């Protein structure tokens, strides 16, 4: 017997066109046992930054009910399953969940390791602890997120590469913010200015002695 819940099939007019994946969109993903998982787009685009919520639901809950769910997985992915209609956008303009982690990454620029923010913007040279800790920026396929969510809910085996999608993994790699760069530059200018003033005073004393 079919469900009375309204379906949200992809509009045939959109066939061959890429759906705009925007921040705040809520998407639904079916799993093989008939339940559904949910995620929220944090940063939109063809390679979105997403959170996947932990609970699998027998039927679609009211969207406000998702606000209290726990973040199970987080990171960059691709919009391919949304494009092909396997993940369905069911809501827009949803506020981000609390405590979304935004990890730092590292990148090699002209032979020097630089720390970036979660979107890849360079903050500054990596510290020794960051060189050992941070990953190069990466994304994982939508199917990996779906498999990891199912494993968290007892469907299938947890695999070691799922670990990088856990929020605690991301939080452990939140080493600094973009605005720290501006403060570091201000501190450096003040330090250098102070030394210039000291050097001038030293020079004056020597000339007068």
Image: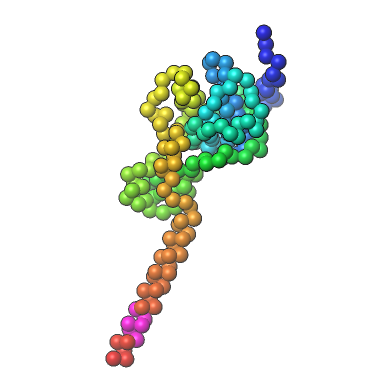
Q: Write the residue at 54% across / 19% down.
A: 31
Please name whichever residue, 167 or 93, is drawn nearer the observer in this view of the structure.
167
Residue 105 lies, in percent from the top left, at 42, 44
Please name whichever residue, 48 or 194, is drawn nearer the observer in this view of the structure.
194
Q: Residue furthest top?
A: 1
Q: Quadrant of residue 33?
A: top right
Please name whichever residue, 84 or 39, is drawn nearer the observer in this view of the structure.
39
Task: Locate the N terminus by quadrant.
Answer: top right
Q: Is residue 193 above or below residue 147?
A: below
Main SS, magenta region, reads: helix
Residue 4 lies, in percent from the top left, at 71, 15
Q: How many marks?
A: 0
Residue 176 lies, in percent from the top left, at 44, 50
Q: Write the residue at 32% across / 87% down.
A: 205
Q: Write the residue at 29% across / 87% down.
A: 206
Q: Is residue 6 left or right of residue 146?
A: right
Question: Is residue 96 rendered magenta in the image?
Answer: no
Q: Is residue 102 visible?
A: yes
Task: Locate the C terminus by quadrant.
Answer: bottom left
Q: Is residue 18 visible?
A: no
Q: Write the residue at 39% across / 78% down.
A: 197
> For the magenta stretch, what is the residue range?
199-204
Q: Is residue 140 left or right of residue 7?
A: left
Q: Is residue 208 above or below residue 119?
A: below
């Amino acid at each position: 017997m079919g469900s009375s819940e309204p379906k949200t099939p992809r509009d045939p007019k959109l066939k061959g066109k890429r759906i705009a994946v925007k921040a705040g969109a809520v998407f639904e993903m079916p799993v093989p046992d008939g339940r559904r998982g949910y995620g929220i787009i944090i940063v939109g685009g063809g390679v979105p930054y997403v959170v996947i919520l932990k609970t699998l639901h027998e039927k679609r809950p009211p969207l406000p009910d998702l606000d209290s769910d726990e973040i199970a997985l987080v990171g960059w992915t691709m919009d391919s399953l949304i494009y092909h209609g396997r993940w369905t956008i069911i809501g827009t303009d949803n506020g981000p969940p609390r405590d979304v982690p935004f990890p730092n990454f590292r990148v090699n620029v002209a032979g020097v390791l630089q720390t970036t923010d979660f979107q890849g913007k360079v903050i500054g040279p990596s510290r020794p602890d960051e060189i050992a800790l941070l990953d190069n920026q990466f994304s994982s396929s939508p199917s990996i997120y779906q498999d990891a969510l199912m494993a968290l809910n007892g469907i299938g085996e947890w695999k070691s590469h799922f670990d990088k999608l856990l929020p605690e993994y991301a939080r452990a790699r939140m080493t600094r913010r973009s605005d720290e760069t501006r403060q570091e530059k201000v501190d450096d200018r003040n330090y250098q200015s102070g030394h210039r003033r000291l050097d001038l005073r030293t020079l004056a004393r020597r000339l007068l002695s």
